[in-house]
Amino acid sequence: QVQLVESGGGLVQPGGSLRLSCAASRSTFGIADMDWYRQAPGKERELVARVTRNGATYYGTSVKGRFTISRDNAKNMVYLQMNTLKPEDTAVYYCHCTYALREYWGQGTQVTVSS
């Protein structure tokens, strides 16, 4: 079983930056992919970024070049650095992983981009 706890959300002006953190309750050495998803009001949840066990990364088209995902397996942490934020980035951001054939989600952290 894995518990995921996100932190770092908040209110930021357009063009600003935020860093989200996700703490896992077990060693992330044994977890292949760690992801960040987001869900805006009235929209489906979408994959924002993924980092594999060996550090390979994938980004959604809308965030490529602005967001950076990373993981620190020694600390059981995953991060999402978000730069040049736009109002359309406003959403609840969720940490996600699959472990032992089960999916795990954090409780989510709200990111609001507004002037």
Image (cartoon, rainbow, N blue to C red):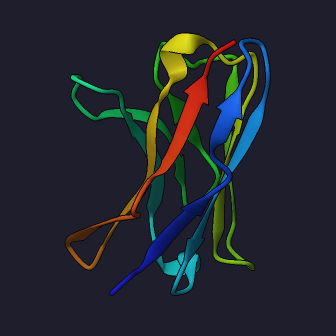
Q: Residue at x 51, y 87 (%)?
A: 26
Q: Residue at x 49, y 13 (%)?
A: 88
Residue 59 in picture, x, y percent from top left: 52, 28
Depth check: 112 or 105 in front?
112
Residue 44 in picture, x, y percent from top left: 21, 28
Horizontal side, residue 104 vs residue 86: left or right: left
The quadrant of the picture occupied by the C terminus is top right
Q: Residue at x 64, y 52 (%)?
A: 55
**In the displayed image of the protein, which residue is found farthest to the right?**
16
Tell me where residue 56 sits by quadrant: top right
Can you say whether 16 is above or below 72 in the image? above
Number of numbered discs on residues: 0
Depth check: 45 or 109 in front?
109
Residue 97 in picture, x, y percent from top left: 38, 62
Depth check: 93 or 11 in front?
11
Tell me where residue 7 sits by quadrant: bottom right
Depth check: 10 or 70 in front?
10
The quadrant of the picture occupied by the N terminus is bottom left
Tell me where residue 113 sits by quadrant: top right
**In the displayed image of the protein, which residue is found farthest to the front?**
115
Horizontal side, residue 21 vs residue 35: left or right: right
Can you say whether 97 is above or below 26 in the image? above
Q: Residue at x 35, y 27 (%)?
A: 40
